[in-house]
Image (cartoon, rainbow, N blue to C red):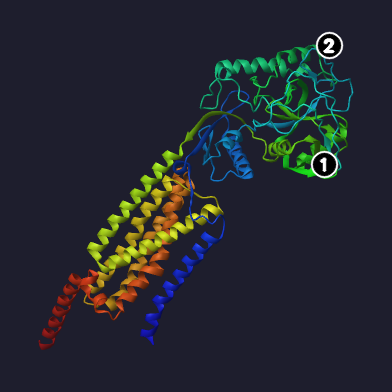
Amino acid sequence: MASSAGHLRPGRYLAFFALIVIVLYALVFLTGNHKPTPKLGIDLQGGTRVTLTARTPDGGQPTRESLNQARQIIERRVNGIGVSGTEVLLDGNNVVITVPGEQGDQAKNLGKTAKLGFRKVVANATQPVVPPQTTPPPATGTPTSGAPTSGAPSSSAPPAASSSAPPSSPAAGGGGAAGALAPQQSTTPAPPSSSTTPPPASSQAPAPSDGSVDAQTAQEIQAAKAVRQNKDLIGADGQPNQELVAKAMAALTCAPNAKDPLEGNDDPKLPLVACGDHDTYKYLLEPEFLPGTEIADANSTYNTQNGQWVVNLSFKSEGTKIWADFTSKNVNQQAAFVLDTQVVSAPNIQVAILDGNTQITGKFTQAEAKDLSDILKYGSLPLSFSSSDATTVSATLGFASLQAGLIAGGIGLLVVFIYCLFYYRLLGVLTILSLALSGALVFAVLVLLGRWIGYTLDLAGIAGLIIAIGITADSFVIYFERLKDEIREGRTFRSAVPRGWVRARRTILASDAVSFLAAAILYVIAVGDVQGFAFTLGMSTVLDLVVVYLVTHPLVAMVSTSKSSFLSNPRNLGLGAVQQLGSQRKKSTSVGRANVKEA
């Protein structure tokens, strides 16, 4: 019965391993996009790497806390817009976004959505840029918005047909829910916002990598603040200082390509003169009463009742209280959503909103509604960023890197195969078979991880896989050398297999545990490519144990009990020399015992 059980046990292990492989490849071919290919990183398939340099209002060093918060928010935006395989990392005072494939344009826009806040529009402060005699400002106390409001600023938005033409009379949006906001909408489409449209190359000053600003830019910021963020713009009675306001608006240029020195550098505690998202309007705004970080969620939906796209907005608990208090006191007033000193929306408050659930209505297109909801949903960055570097990695270079990695791995496997065949012969064949099955297992896991968690394979990951070949081969060497030790002591191959496995198993477990622990620690403390190396190394170490336990040992056990003279011949297994040495030791031991008895 024991012999029969011994014959069946290796078969059970192999059957269990075969079941694992079948299940994995069924998932590979029958789920997802059915393509049996892992996701590749930027260094293998090409892509875009964007470096965002942080800017602070005072030109000083950004705090580590604000940088980490900005990185987390950008990551949420990445996940929200569905850009797969993207990495968002901190490099000093910079945020580095890496996007594989052809999604680089989306990465370049991720850092443009920066500081968001809510400010009250001061009465009669919205004025057209064109001369007053051609387009007079709205009458005092008008409850409707005097500025057109599109959705979010977007580089893909269509340009205005005429930037200087006065907008037509706005149509009030219908609030579909209690407490709805009603942004006004002109019949002329709004051009791209100046906060998202790149300024001419000549007007851009390179941002230092340490997050500070150069002397000229710092002077421009202070000069703009002195005029457009003067604390006396609004008097103690809440009325605007007409002289200072006129001077501030005259100093402000709202052309689409105009560079605003206060972009991302405004002080939320002071009044602000800012451009609207239409280049013929300017606003005088009170200090910020609600930061964008208090927004809980936002989404765009189609209102079937009025046939319009709307934006639904909700706040966190503290934000709900502030918003309820503000809307209660400012019915028929405007609340401006200010993004990097740019008013992206200035809806009219129709009724008090006590529960925070707000609906913004207007003549939005689907794209405009989604853009505005994205700005609100994915949080307000604690810092503003400028794109200091955008590098495109060609797919040709990535393919060459992949080819080089595969060649290196193939050479490594070939060397291991030759060594195993030369030194272990038939046992070397079992090693090659085990490595091939291990490779099949690793490949299936990489494909599935790419689909399930977005894991992308890069050159560092391939390096981890190549090193893992050595770890797997090391497990075989430990096992086979332990077999040799047992046979050297005079045991047969059949009796040496179970004893050698028990002793080798401990060493293999200890060795793989150390390798996995090193990979885990490296993954936790490292960033970027090094994490990819640690991940594949740790994963391959775990799969090595699976292969050794479920494939290598069962195969060796089956060969040891085989009745084939070819398989049972020690010379064909690379064990001829040690078996001869074992026989001599056994014979000398027998002779020694006989001499002891005679004596």
Say which residue appears at 47% left-offset and 43% top-offset.
45
Element at label 2: loop
Inter-mark Cα distance, 1 to 2: 37 Å
Q: Quadrant of residue 135?
A: top right
Q: Is residue 479 left or right of residue 327?
A: left
Report the amino acid beneath label 2: Gln
Q: Is residue 417 left or right of residue 450?
A: left
Q: Residues within 10 Å of mark 1 (few under 14, many from 20)?
A: few
The quarter of the image holding the C terminus is bottom left
Mark 1 or 2: the one toward you: 1
Q: Quadrant of residue 58?
A: top right
Of mark 1 and mark 2, the one earlier in the sequence is 2
Report the amino acid beneath label 1: Gly
- Does residue 527 show up? no
The quarter of the image holding the N terminus is bottom left
Residue under numbered circle 1: 307
- Does residue 13 show up? yes
Residue under numbered circle 2: 133
| Residue 166 position within the rendered picture, expressed as x and y whole percent measured from the top left | 80, 20
- Examine the rendered structure and indicate whether residue 454 appears above or below residue 331: below
